[in-house]
Image: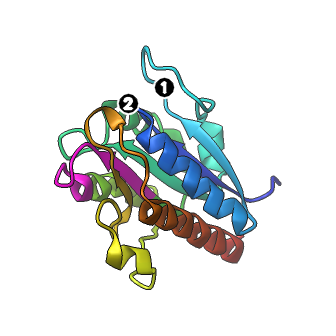
């Protein structure tokens, strides 16, 4: 049996979602659980982290799923990946594993919450336990940019030029740590 790990699976076009993924992984590892950063395939896109395999998804102890907002939804590349996961679904390999979602948009009202809620749907079909961002995290009360109870988020501005705010970093790390605690509880 492999050691427990959080799969931080994301798609990123301009780097903002990748930056969120890195901070979630940092929070998870600071809490004592390994995090594996993986991307989904996207034609013509260079990736910083390795492409995910279905086996890595099936074997993960928990999942953080991230996608940029595209018209209030996750990207086609991320949807295409989930459409390939039927073999895992049929075997029930993700049932009762904790999962969280995260996103980035170019504007404050660019569809973040709709994207996060939509990203949860395939996770529910797989029987995963959805983990949000509780309001006991002070940064959720004071953020002027990203951060929702549905998951971590970032307002990137056009072409992803805005760096993560301190509140966004804090919320990502808190979400990663929360997933790590749950992974240790369920492992």
Name the residue at 25% across, 59% down: 113
Report the residue that reaches farthest toward the top. 44
Q: Position of residue 32 (x, y in %)?
A: 75, 66
Residue 42 appears in view? yes
N-terminal label among 1 and 2 = 1
Q: CA distance from mark 1 to mark 2?
A: 7 Å
Asked if the residue at tag 2 contacts the one at tag 1, i.e. Cβ–Cβ closer than 8 Å, the answer is yes
Q: Residue 180: which quarter of the image?
A: bottom right
Name the residue at 32% across, 44% down: 156
In magenta stretch: residue 104: yes
Disc 1 designates what residue?
A: 41
Q: How is the image coloured?
A: rainbow
Disc 2 designates what residue?
A: 77
Q: Is residue 167 above or below residue 22?
A: below
Residue 93 appears in view? no
Q: Position of residue 28 (x, y in %)?
A: 65, 62
């Amino acid at each position: 049996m492999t050691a427990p790990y959080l799969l931080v699976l994301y798609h990123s076009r301009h780097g903002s979602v990748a930056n969120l993924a890195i901070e979630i992984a940092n929070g998870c590892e600071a809490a004592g659980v390994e995090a594996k950063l993986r991307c989904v395939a996207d034609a013509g896109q260079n990736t910083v982290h390795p492409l995910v395999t279905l086996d890595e998804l099936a074997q993960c102890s928990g999942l953080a799923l991230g996608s940029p907002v595209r018209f209030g939804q996750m990207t086609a590349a991320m949807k295409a990946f989930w459409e390939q996961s039927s073999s895992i679904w049929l075997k029930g390999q993700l049932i009762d594993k904790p999962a969280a979602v995260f996103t980035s948009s170019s504007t404050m009202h660019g569809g973040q919450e709709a994207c996060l809620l939509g990203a949860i749907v395939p996770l529910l079909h797989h029987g995963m336990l959805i983990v949000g961002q509780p309001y006991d995290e002070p940064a959720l009360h004071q953020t002027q940019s990203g951060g929702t109870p549905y998951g971590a988020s970032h307002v990137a501005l056009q072409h992803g030029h805005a760096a993560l705010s301190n509140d966004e970093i804090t919320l990502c790390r808190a979400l990663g740590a929360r997933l790590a605690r749950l992974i240790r509880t369920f492992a």
